[in-house]
Amino acid sequence: MAPAKLKWYTVMWPVEQLSWADFRGKVLGATNPAQAAEGSVRRAILDQWQSLGLAKEPYTSENGVHASASPIEALFERMNW
């Protein structure tokens, strides 16, 4: 198994078309991947965890992707990491 990796991305979108809350809730999906909607990132990770080479099925604490709770929190997290 390959060593764990951390990657970060900066994403941008027109806020009049997608709110921060919808980005986190609809695009990424619920924190618990089992409750994430079909088509969301976390649901896709759950559905494909073995083919992605993950050691175990994703769950609430290790769900495959993190998004900050707000734009200002994102800035602080970037500064911290």
Image (cartoon, rainbow, N blue to C red):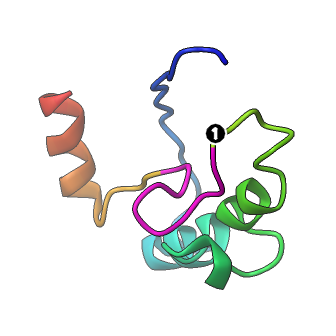
The image shows residue 47 at horizontal and vertical percentages of: 82, 61
Residue at which label 1 appears: 55
**Label 1 crowd bin: few (<14), some (14–19), many (20+), radius 10 Å:** few
Q: Is residue 16 above or below residue 61?
A: below
Query: Which of 10/33 is in front?
Result: 33
The answer to whether residue 81 is left or right of residue 20 is: left
Q: Quadrant of the N terminus?
A: top right
Res. 17 image quadrant: bottom right
Look at 24% across and 33% down and name the residue there.
78
What residue lies at 44% left-to-right and 70% top-to-bottom? 20
Identify which residue is drawn at 53% across, 75% down: 32
Work out whether residue 11 or residue 50 is closer to the camera in this orientation and state it.
Answer: 50
Q: Is residue 6 left or right of residue 74?
A: right
Which residues make up the magenta segment?
A: 56-65
Secondary structure state at the residue bearing disc 1: loop
Q: Main secondary structure of the magenta part?
A: loop
Q: Position of residue 44 (x, y in %)?
A: 78, 59
Disc tally is 1
Rendering quarter of residue 45: bottom right
Q: Is residue 45 above or below residue 36?
A: above
Q: Is residue 40 above or below residue 76?
A: below
At 46% from the left and 30% from the top, the residue drawn is: 8
Q: Position of residue 81 (x, y in %)?
A: 21, 27
Q: Whole-percent x and y of residue 80?
A: 13, 31
From the viewer's side, name the closer residue of 58 and 18. Answer: 58
Q: Is residue 42 left or right of residue 80?
A: right
Give above or below for 77 relative to 34. Answer: above
Specify the amino acid type for callout 1: Ala
